[in-house]
Amino acid sequence: MQFGIFSVGDVTVDPTTGRAPTEGERIKAILAIALKAEEVGLDVFATGEHHNPPFVPSSPTTMLGWIAAKTERIVLSTATTLITTNDPVKIAEDYAMLQHVADGRVDLMMGRGNTGPVYPWFGQDIRQGIPLATENYALLRRLWREEVVDWEGRFRTPLQGFTSTPRPLDDTPPFVWHGSIRSPEIAEQAAYWGDGFFHNNIFWPQEHTRRMVQLYRTRFAHHGHGTPEQAIVGLGGQVFMRKNSQDEAIVGLGGQVFMRKNSQDAVREFRPYFDNAPVYGHGPSLEEFTEATPLTVGSPQQVIERTLGFRDAVGDYQRQLFLMDHAGLPLKTVLEQLDILGEEVVPVLREEFAKLRPAGVPDAPTHAALAAARQQTEAAK
């Protein structure tokens, strides 16, 4: 099982100082966070893709290419690759190049994004979001798997005798997760192709996540890729931690976490960030939000217990990502959180999930495993 973090790359005012970082400062902070993630022993760093303020990650491959050059082990992923508004030809080329730069430590999470105006900015119609996602991804798969492609579809100019370069490393395309919060069509798309399904459940209750993952597992088996338990599932959320806990209910899935030694300190420190965050603030209270959604603010033990509970809702799964650098939290605090996550939380989660994991549940996909499977398939022909 893989554990890691993802960043949406927001530039948000720190409510305790009244200051927002510059775009340059925020970009440098994300790079520092990625390096820290490898240092503390995490498996994955993922970045979102946005083309509007207050976000900075408009070019994930540029960022991930720099991180690849500075790291040796961590898997580099997108938290969203906009399959609807990016040209699939450019996606095929960019991420095959990144594969080579990173020696295969690359995968992608396809998504439609959450910003409506991005569609006309890139010449598309938001009303065609699902058809765009379906057609563009079908073309992307062919570009990675066929050396010469002829193509004609609804949303881009035809291709005749086109070869995408460079070819995927070891003739093995990056593994693809299809990310969605609410769209069953995307769960179906992941199941149809036998790809991974990633449910980013920051704002949703446990029952919604359970239904979406169950739909994906059922359809994965329907399309002949294996049993429902063999489907590849990832969960994402946000965490804020401090080091001790009081007995509290363990509810929900994923969520931001904020940890301190005792839960009261965590709540006190995180509250101004929650109250003023663009995505959280001015609505339900912190207590109401943590009860109804995956947001966890407390001690490492609380985060461990809550995360282990996710298995009860969705079954054994392959990837757990946490959102740590959000809502204006200063870099120093985020790096402290990563120390706690890497030293006190993830080692326990690895051990406990491994104890519970039945035989036959697949590991998280890696480039080496995918390349070996491809070679076996070719040898058997």
Image: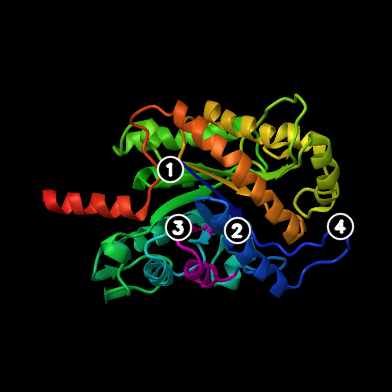
Residue highlighted by disc 2: 36
Real-space CA distance between mark 2 and mark 3, rounded to the nearest whole angstrom: 12 Å
Mark seen at residue 73: 3
Amino acid on which the number 4 mark rests in the picture: Pro
Q: Which residue is mark 1?
A: 188
Mark 4 vs mark 1, CA separation in Å = 41 Å
The tag on residue 15 is 4
Instruction: Give the residue displayed 66% in from the left and 42% down from the top.
Output: 255
The correct choice, above or below, for 364 with respect to 78 in the image is above
Above or below residue 88? Residue 312 is above
State the SS at label 1.
Answer: helix
The tag earlier along the polypeptide, 3 or 4, is 4
The residue lying at 13 percent from left, 52 percent from top is: 379
For the residue carrying disc 1, how many other residues have a C-alpha within 10 Å: few (<14), some (14-19), or many (20+)? many
Q: Amino acid under label 3? A: Arg
User: Which region of the structure is painted magenta?
Assistant: 58-80
> What is the quadrant of residue 201 in the picture?
top right
- Mark 2 or 1: in front is 2
Asked if the stretch drawn in magenta spans residue 204, the answer is no
